[in-house]
Amino acid sequence: MFDFHLHSNVSFDSKVAPQELAEAAVAAGLKEICFTDHYDYNSDPLKRADLFTIADYRAAHDGLQLPGLTIRKGVEFGLTRWNAPHLKELLGQYPFDFVIGSVHYVDGYDPHEAPYWQGLTVREGFEKHLLETLRCVQVHEDFDVLGHLTYACKSRHNPTHAPIEMTDFQEIIDEILLCLIRKGKGMEVNTSGIDRAGAFLPAAPYLHRYKQLGGEIVTVGSDAHYCARVGQYIPEALAMLKEIFGYVCTFEKRKPIFHKIP
Ligand SMILES: [Zn+2]
Ligand SMILES: [Zn+2]
């Protein structure tokens, strides 16, 4: 089992040391994990920039070993329309194994927080985030997988707590998926949506569509920020991927490795 989306205390919003997360991963029966600490470079100086320094990253992650566990080093980079040069610069400073590109902000506002939703219906809120996701994947080249497509639905400010139905936004979704496929990028199945919105981010229909259009690269991650969530719903995500693809990917040195799901 693999968990390729974990936040240690190198991330602004986690307090857990990498060692503790790694021990939790072993306890959860995982064979391989990847730390993907937040690096959100927001070009609007009035908005938050949640960054780490390479020195802090190295101090936390370099040299960490645990018997029976393979540990990869990655980053969850917050994609914006303007920060592609910053991602390139970051990648020049450290040999990351894996880069998740995630869209956390639209015009400086995070759907996870209330101000984003001001004046928007639920549908408008979903659509706005999906359109921004499309713009971001169009301008970025240096990520490996798109993180948590349908992120907006897991917000505690989504009054319906319902997932985003693919068919409600089929045209935008197809454009996003086709852009990813054209660029050889993968899709993440993020399990953190199960408790918040009752679905993986994204759910099975999106993965079917990605495959149907020619997509091949899929990873799984819990997005855990504390130990109890490490590996959560990963068996369920793998069961879904087994049905659709028959395999799941991990990454080493930015290259996908395909694992048949038994
Ligand atoms: Zn994220
Ligand atoms: Zn995350």
Image (cartoon, grey):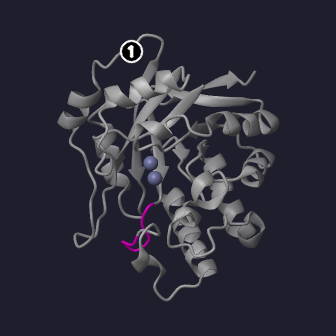
The residue most toward the bottom is 119
Q: Is residue 141 above or below residue 162?
A: above
The residue most toward the top is 67
Q: Name the element at disc 1.
A: loop
Q: Residue at x 41, y 45 (%)?
A: 76
Please state which amino acid type lies under the numbered disc 1.
Leu
Q: Is residue 232 magenta?
A: no
Secondary structure mainly formed by the magenta segment: loop
> Where residue 228 sits in the image (x, y, percent)?
46, 38
What is the total number of numbered labels drawn onto the structure image?
Answer: 1
Q: Residue at x 67, y 33 (%)?
A: 235
- The one of 4 and 180 positioned closer to us in this rendering: 4
Name the side, left or right, on which 149 lies relative to 226: right
Q: Residue at x 31, y 38 (%)?
A: 16
Name the side, left or right, on which 235 lies relative to 255: right
> Where residue 169 sits in the image (x, y, percent)?
71, 70
Residue 46 at least partly seen: yes
Residue 67 in which image quadrant: top left
Q: Which residue is mark 1?
A: 66
Residue 95 at least partly seen: no
| Quarter of the C terminus within the rendering | top right
Q: Tell me which segment is drawn in magenta.
A: 104-109
- The one of 91 and 71 positioned closer to us in this rendering: 71
Q: Is residue 40 above or below residue 75?
A: below
For mark 1, does the 10 Å Cα neighbourhood hold few (<14), some (14 to 19), or many (20 or more) residues? few
Q: Residue at x 34, y 45 (%)?
A: 88
> Where residue 39 sits in the image (x, y, percent)?
33, 49
Q: Is mark 1 within 8 Å of ligand 2?
A: no
| Quarter of the N terminus within the rendering | top right
> Where residue 22 sits in the image (x, y, percent)?
40, 26
